[in-house]
Image: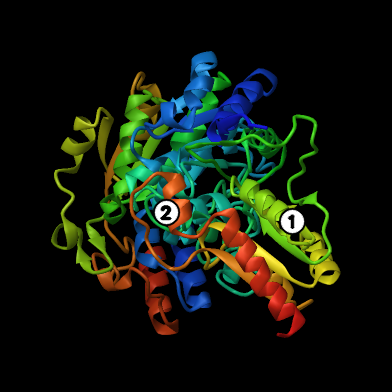
Amino acid sequence: MSLKMLPTRDGYGNGLVELGATRPEVVVLDADLAKSTRTDWFQAKYPERFFDIGIAEQDMIGTAAGLSLGGKVPFATTYAVFVAGRAWDQIRTTVCYSNLNVKIAGAHGGISAGGDGATHQSLEDVAVMRVLPNMTVILPCDAIEAKKATIAAASMHGPCYLRFAREATPVFTREDDPFEIGKAIVMKPGEDVTIIAAGPLLHEALLAHDQLAAEGVSARVINMHTVKPLDAAAVLAAAKETGAIVTVDEAQLAGGLGGAVAETLVSTVPVPVEMVGIVDTFLECGLPEELAVAYNLKAKDFVDAAKRVLKRKRGD
Amino acid sequence: MESVERLKEICKDVRADIVRMTNAAGSGHPGGSLSAVEAMVTLYCNVMNHRPADPAWADRDRFFLSKGHVCPVVYATMARTGYFPVEELLTLRKLGTRLQGHPSCKTLPGIEVSSGSLGQGLSVANGFALSARLDRKPYRAYCLLGDGELQEGQVWEAIMTAAHYKLDNVCAIVDYNGLQIDGEVEKVMGIAPLADKWRAFNWHVIEVDGHDVAKMLAAYDEARQTRGKPSVILMRTIKGKGVSFMENVAGWHGKPCNRDEMALALADIYGKGH
C-alpha cells in the first residue's frame, strides 16, 4: 500500500487558513519566506492579518509579542534554524519571560532542508526551544497532525514552538485520530521495548516495529509529538512495562527528545535507553533521504538500537 | 493634568526616589534613570491616557521600556502617579519584590512587557500599534530607548518596520545622553548623525532638550499630531542629571550612591535649604 506523501508545512498552511476563518484574532507574520513556509496561503485569504517583516527574524518575534499584547494570536514563521537560533534571545526575554501568547513556527526543520547544507539544516532548535521556561514544543509527524497541532496551538495560552518539515513525508495518521498537546499517542502496543519518536521519523519507527515483529520482538511505538511538556506518564509506563527504551531525534542528541526522556527516567525508572539522532556534528548537503541513510536515521538503525537496548536489558 | 511647575516638583521627587531606591538596593542604574526623568514624568502625568488604579484597562496607551535597566525611573514615576505606594520603591532588587532589577510584567501590573536585554522594545511597540490599527483603536504606543542601545541591530529593523507600516501611533523616545558603560557613545561605537539617520528611515524627528518639561510636553503633542509616519523624540539629556557629581560621568551608569553620597545627592536635587 503506497501512502500519500505531503510535507508537514502544508498542514501548517492549511491549519492557518482554517484558523483565519474561525479565529479573527489569529494573525500571521513571516520573514520573507511566505511561499516556502506556506503562510502565503493565509496571506491570500486574509491579507489584512498578514505581516511580512522582511528578513528580520528578531524584529518579527518582537512584533509578534506586541501583537499578542493587543489580544492577537500571532504565528511568527520562518525557517526553524533562523527563528530558533537568531531570535533566541527575543524568544527568551520578550516572549517566554513575559509568557506571551506567541506561536513560533519553524519550517524546514531537521534534515529536510538537505540540499541547502548545514547552514539551513535545523538540528539544534529542539534543544534551544525546550530549555526555555513557559515554552511548549511540538513536532508534528505528518501533514494531518501538523494541521491539528497548528489549530491546537492557537487554543492554548502561552509561547509555543511548532516544527515543520520541507520534504513530502508519509501521511499515516487519520483526520479523526485524537490530538491533544502534551498527550502522547501509543501508535503500536508492545511489551519488550518502546520506541519513542516525534516528527516525520515516527513513520520509520513504525517500519522498525514491523521489522522487529518479524523477528519476534514486541515493540511499543509512542508518538511524542509534544516534546515539552513531555508526557512523563507515558514514558514511565513504557519504562515499567517494557523495561527498555529507544529514542529517536531528527536533531542533535544533546537536549533533544532523547534527552528529555532520559532526564525523566534517570531519577525514576532508570531502564536502559538507546538514543538515535545526530551526534554532535554539522551535516553536509544531500537529499534528505540520503542524509537519513548516511546519519543512521532509518528504520534499520532503530532496529539495531532496539537490539542493543534489549541486550542491556537482559544484562548480557 | 499637572502644571509645568508641579511637574518640575514631581521630577525632583522622582530623582530623589531613584537615588534612595538604588542606594537601598546596593545596585542598579541611577545615571540613565536620572536622564529620563522629565520624559517619564511628563508622559505619565500629562500625555498618556491610562488609569493607575486599573493598570489592565483595555483602552490605555502603552509604554514599553526598551532600555530595561532604567526601570528605577519608571518605578518611581509609577509610584508617584498612583500605581503603588512610594514606600515600595525601597524593595527594589530584593528577594520577593515586585520591582525586579529589570522590569517583569509578571510581577508588577503596569509593566507591559519584561525587558532588560537591549534592542527589543521598539519591535514590541510596533506589534502593539499594528494590533491597535487592526482593531481601529485610538491608543498609542510609546517606547523609551537609550542612545547606546541604538547600536543593537534589531532597533534598526524595528525602525524600518514602523516606517514601512506607517505606524503614526508609535512614538519612540531616545535618551540621547551621549554616554554608555564603556564611555562616550561616539568613542565606543558612533551613532551620529542620529537625526539624519531616523529621517532617512522615514520617521518624523523631533529634537528637544529632554530636561525642559514644557518642551517635552510640546514634543509629545507634535508626535501625536503627526500623521502617516512614526515619530521619534530625540531628547538631548545629561546622564546623571540633577546630581552634580553624577552628571556626565559614565561611571554612574550602574553604580548606586553610598550613604554619604546620597545626602549630597538629595541636597543637589532639593536645594541646600530643603
Chain of the residue on which disc 2 is drawn = A
Q: What residue is rendered at 37% in x and 61% in y? A: A282
Q: What's under tag 1, amino acid-wise? A: Ala
Q: Nearer the viewer, residue B182 or B243?
A: B182
- Residue picked out by circle 2: A85
* Image vertical order of residue A53 relative to residue B112, above or below: above
Disc number for residue A214: 1
For numbered disc 1, what is the local secondary structure?
helix
For numbered disc 2, what is the local secondary structure?
helix
Q: Residue A48: percent from the left, percent from the top?
A: 50, 17
Q: Residue B223: percent from the left, percent from the top?
A: 36, 29
Q: What's under tag 2, amino acid-wise? A: Gly
Q: Nearer the viewer, residue B170 or B248?
A: B170
Mark-to-mark CA distance, 1 and 2: 42 Å
| Residue B59, quarter of picture | top right
Q: What residue is rendered at 41% in x and 32% in y? A: B170
